Image (cartoon, rainbow, N blue to C red):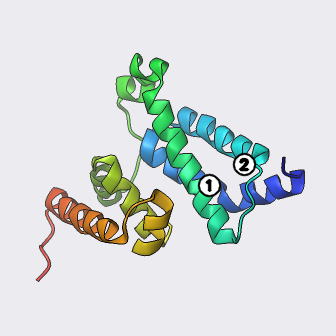
Amino acid sequence: MRSEQEINRAIERYSDTVRRLCMIHLKSYADTEDIFQTVFLKYALSSVHFESEEHEKAWIIRVTINACKDLFKSFFRSRTTSLETLIDQPAPMNPDHREVLEAVLSLPPKYRDVIYLHYYEGYSAPEIGKIVGRNVNTIYTLLARSRQMLREKLGGEADA
């Protein structure tokens, strides 16, 4: 079990990353908060020794993604509809940003994850490969395909 000081440091350092990842996957503030608590509880109870800050961050990201996937597989989740879906009143946002966000969120999860890790967290393809447990060439392919999908959704020009 980790000390309170270690846990507080991790929360300060990684809370934004965990929340953003959850919102991308879950699109629900309440579910995001639930997974946030789950991730840091697992961190507190974990006996894993981290080799570096990057190893720790990769562990936090992996646990977050897995917790989001577990939530989607849960019996309760598969039998309910979110209030956001029922209300369908998105928060005010710049129209250009909304269009990009909707396009990113509409991507299949494997593409959405690599786009998020690359553009929002600043990871390189080899680093993403280690985090998600895939070959680096697969990551390059996923990035290229997701960029193409976004280009098509957003009506952008193809690369020359």
Quadrant occupied by the C terminus:
bottom left
Mark 1: which secondary structure?
helix
Mark 1 nearby-residue class (10 Å; few <14, some 14–19, many ≥20): many
Q: Do labels 2 and 1 touch, CB within 8 Å?
A: yes
Image quadrant of residue 48? Answer: bottom right
| Quarter of the rendering containing residue 104 | bottom left
Determine which residue is flagged by label 1.
Answer: 60
Identify the residue at image location x=40%, y=73%: 125
Residue at point 48%, 18% (across, down): 76
Q: Amino acid at mark 1?
A: Ile
Whole-percent x, y for residue 44 in the image: 78, 46
70 sits to left or right of 137: right
Q: Quadrant of residue 84?
A: top left
x, y (%) of residue 53? 69, 70
Say which amino acid is labelled 2. Tyr
Residue 43 disc label: 2
Classify residue 34 as left or right of residue 12.
Answer: left
Residue 66 locus on image (x, y percent)? 51, 43
Residue 79 sits above or below residue 88 on the image:
above
- Residue farthest to the bottom, as pictured: 160
- Among the two numbered marks 2 and 1 on one chain, the one whose residue lies closer to the N terminus: 2
* Viewer-closest of 16 and 10: 10
Q: Residue at x 28, y 50 (%)?
A: 107
Please indicate, yes or no, whether residue 101 appears anywhere in the rendered image.
no
Question: Quick check: 103 left or right of 51?
Answer: left
Q: Is residue 155 visible?
A: yes
Q: Which of the two residues, 53 or 105, is positioned nearer the viewer here?
A: 53
Residue at disc 2, secondary structure: helix
